[in-house]
Image (cartoon, helix red, strand yellow):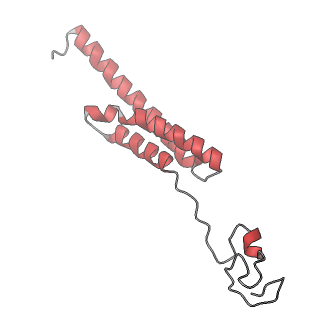
Amino acid sequence: MFCKNCGAQIDDRAVICPKCGVATDNYRNGGQNGNASSKKPTNWYAIWGLVLGLLGLFGGGYIFCIMPVLGIIFSALGLKRAKQTEDQGVGLAVGGIVVSVFATAIWLFVWILAFILIAQGYYTV
């Protein structure tokens, strides 16, 4: 490409002309031209929220009852970040919240049922 100010031939990815120092169209477009790919930051909160919700849903030990609660927290943080940065991770964060709430409800049902069975004397510890 050629500089619009001095006419010097410059690299197509140049943001500023090395000859005269004037900004190119790439600078005005945020440093992105048609060939470059725009890399968005990864919303790790939303990803971990969904992973923790799934682990809590399919896990079998006592530690797995904590994971969906953490999944709700991480997914809520991911949703907040996605809305602030206008990221595409909104769906991932909402999915993490749904799975985590469902897993938390299942664990609450299991614990309430266990408490009732122990209180009624059907199960002794």
- In this image, 92 relative to 5: left or right? left
Which residue sits furthest right?
Answer: 5
Q: Nearer the viewer, residue 10 or 60?
A: 10
Residue 125, compared with residue 43, is above or below; it is above
Residue 118, compared with residue 42, is above or below; it is above
Instruction: Locate residue 44, reporting x and y percent.
Output: 48, 50
Quadrant showing the N terminus = bottom right
- In this image, 83 relative to 16: left or right? left
Q: Which residue is located at x 50 percent, y 38 percent?
A: 97
Which residue sits furthest left?
Answer: 125
Q: Which residue is located at x 42 percent, y 32 percent?
A: 69
Q: Quadrant of residue 25?
A: bottom right
Instruction: Locate residue 53, reporting x and y percent.
Output: 41, 40
Residue 12, compared with residue 38, is above or below; it is below
Q: Which residue is located at x 36 percent, y 28 percent?
A: 107
Instruction: Locate residue 41, reporting x and y percent.
Output: 55, 57
Instruction: Locate residue 87, reporting x and y percent.
Output: 61, 52
Q: Quadrant of residue 49?
A: top left
Which residue sits furthest front?
Answer: 20
How many badges with numbers are in the image? 0
Q: Which residue is located at x 83 percent, y 83 percent?
A: 4
Q: Nearer the viewer, residue 91 or 11?
A: 11
Quadrant showing the C terminus = top left
Which residue sits furthest top?
Answer: 120
